[in-house]
Amino acid sequence: MNMDQHWVLRTDISGMPLEWVSCRDVIKLYYLEQVAYTCGDVTQRVYGGTCARTGLRSVIEINSILATHGQCRKPGFCSPDYVPPLNNSALFARDAWLCMYCGGEFDRSDLSRDHVTPLTQGGMNLWSNVVTACRRCNTFKAGRTPEQAGLQLLAVPFVPTHAEYVFLRARRVLADQMEFLQAHFPRRSPLRNRTMV
C-alpha cells in the first residue's frame, strides 16, 4: 500500500486550513496525540499490530481533513495583510497553467513568470505584478509593459489568501477537500469555480 497516495488537508482547531500532510505525518500526529477531530471521507485505513492482551488489531482511519491542536508554524497567515510566498508552481496554478497573454495552455516547462511592469521599469516581484506567460509571449514582451508591447492581459493578477495558497500548493484535491477549502475563499475569488488541481 502506498501510504502517500492521498494528501490530507491539515487545519488548526478552528478549521482554518494550514497545509497538506502525508499519511505518514497523520500517523505521527495521532501518535503525538495532536489530532483534535477529523472531517471528510476516510481515504485509507492503516493496520498495526495485534494487542497481546485483547487480541485486537490496531487500525488508524485516515480522513481527508484533519484538525490538530497546537500552534501553526506560520504565524500571521490569518491576518488580512498576509502575503504567501511567491513561487512559480503556485503562480502557474493561480493562472490555471494558461499564458495570460495568448490564452494557450502549456506544460510547466513551457511557462515562465512575467512581470507586468518589468523590473527594468521599476516593477516589483510581487503577486500583484506577475502573471504566467508562455516563453514565446514573454520573449516578445521583453522589458516592456503589456501596453508598450501591444498585448492585453486576460486576467488581473491577484494576491491569494492563505486558504487559496493552500489550494494552489495541492497535487490532487479530493471533492470534500475542495468544498472545505472553497468555504474559506473570499466571495469573489477567481478560484471559486475551479475544479481540482
Image (spheres, helix red, strand yellow):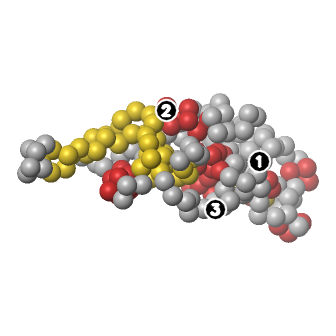
Q: In the structure shown, which secondary structural element does the residue marked by tag 3 occupy?
A: loop
Q: Which amino acid does label 2 sit on?
A: Asp
Location of the C terminus (image quadrant): top right
Q: Identify the residue under disc 3.
A: 75
Q: In this view, does 136 lie above or below 194?
A: below
Q: In which quarter of the image is residue 98?
A: top right
Q: Where in the figure is residue 186, as x and y percent of width and height?
A: 72, 38
* N-terminal-most mark, 3 or 1: 3
> In the rendered image, is residue 1 in sight?
yes
Total marks placed = 3
Taking depth in this image into account, of 188 and 10 the one nearest to the observer is: 10
Residue that appears at 85% across and 69% down: 120
> In the rendered image, is residue 169 in sight?
no
- CA distance separating discs 1 and 2: 25 Å
Taking depth in this image into account, of 36 and 185 the one nearest to the observer is: 36
Most extreme residue toward the right is 148
CA neighbours of label 2 inside 10 A, class few (<14), some (14 to 19), many (20+): some
CA neighbours of label 3 inside 10 A, class few (<14), some (14 to 19), many (20+): few
* N-terminal-most mark, 2 or 3: 3
Q: In the structure shown, which secondary structural element does the residue marked by tag 2 occupy?
A: helix
Q: Identify the residue under disc 2.
A: 176
Q: Which of marks 3 and 1 is in front?
A: 3
Look at the numbered discs 2 and 3 and tell me whether their residues touch, using CB distance below 8 Å.
Answer: no
- CA distance separating discs 3 and 1: 22 Å
Taking depth in this image into account, of 46 and 157 the one nearest to the observer is: 46
Per the rendering, the mark at residue 158 is: 1
Q: Where in the figure is residue 155, as x and y percent of width and height?
A: 78, 41
Q: Which amino acid does label 1 sit on?
A: Phe
Q: Where in the figure is residue 26, as x and y percent of width and height?
A: 38, 52
Q: Which amino acid does label 3 sit on?
A: Pro
